[in-house]
Amino acid sequence: MTLDLDLTESTGACHCGAVRFHVRLSEGLRSARRCNCSFCQMRGAIAVSARVGELEILQGADALTLYQFGTSTAKHYFCRHCGIYTHHQRRSNPQEYGVNIACLTGLSPFDFTEVEVLNGREHPSDKANGREVVGVLRFEPS
């Protein structure tokens, strides 16, 4: 499958389907990235960008639960039934959401052969030089 990096809109859902949403992607799939902070390292998701206001929960807002840590600036949302992370409001830009690519209809993290990994351990909000790419995660199908 060839990825349409210019994809601008999608629907999505958690694993059990309790949470369903529609999203407009501000940079298409070109914004796909991972983070190496302690939380994202364990979560392992690839996220793409959407502006706040461009993600609409269609069903299951009451099924979403919030997790915050550290500075409590970022807001990470999960389905309380199946535990799947759907999206988060970013610490680096609170006017932006990161949306879990695995929740978007017809997409998988394994559709991406390379994804930039950003330095969340030394968060851009804590440094003068901002966004820093620290590596690339690769998937090579056999």
Image (cartoon, helix red, strand yellow):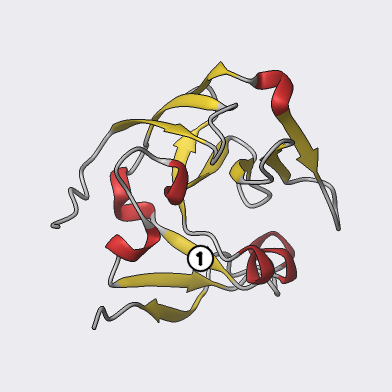
**Which x, y percent locates residue 105?**
34, 37
Question: How many numbered discs?
Answer: 1
Residue 48 visible at all: no
**Which residue is at 65% across, 68% downward?**
128
**Which residue is at 37% across, 37% downward?**
26
Q: Is residue 42 left or right of residue 49?
A: right
**Which x, y percent locates residue 22?**
43, 24
**Which residue is at 47% across, 59% downward?**
46
Tell which of 98 and 140 is nearer to you.
Answer: 140
Quadrant (top left/top right/bottom left/bottom right) for the N terminus: bottom left
**Which x, y percent locates residue 16?**
57, 36
Tell which of 23 and 44 is nearer to you.
Answer: 44
Q: Is residue 33 left or right of residue 141?
A: right
**Which residue is at 62% across, 73% downward?**
36
List the residue tagged with mark 1: 34
Q: Is residue 81 left or right of residue 131?
A: right
Q: Is residue 136 above or below residue 5?
A: below
Q: Is residue 11 above or below residue 42?
A: above
Name the residue type under label 1: Arg
Residue 69 visible at all: yes
Q: Is residue 107 above or below residue 50?
A: below
SS at circle 1: strand
**Which x, y percent locates residue 13?**
49, 33
Quadrant (top left/top right/bottom left/bottom right) for the C terminus: bottom left
Q: Is residue 131 left or right of residue 32?
A: right
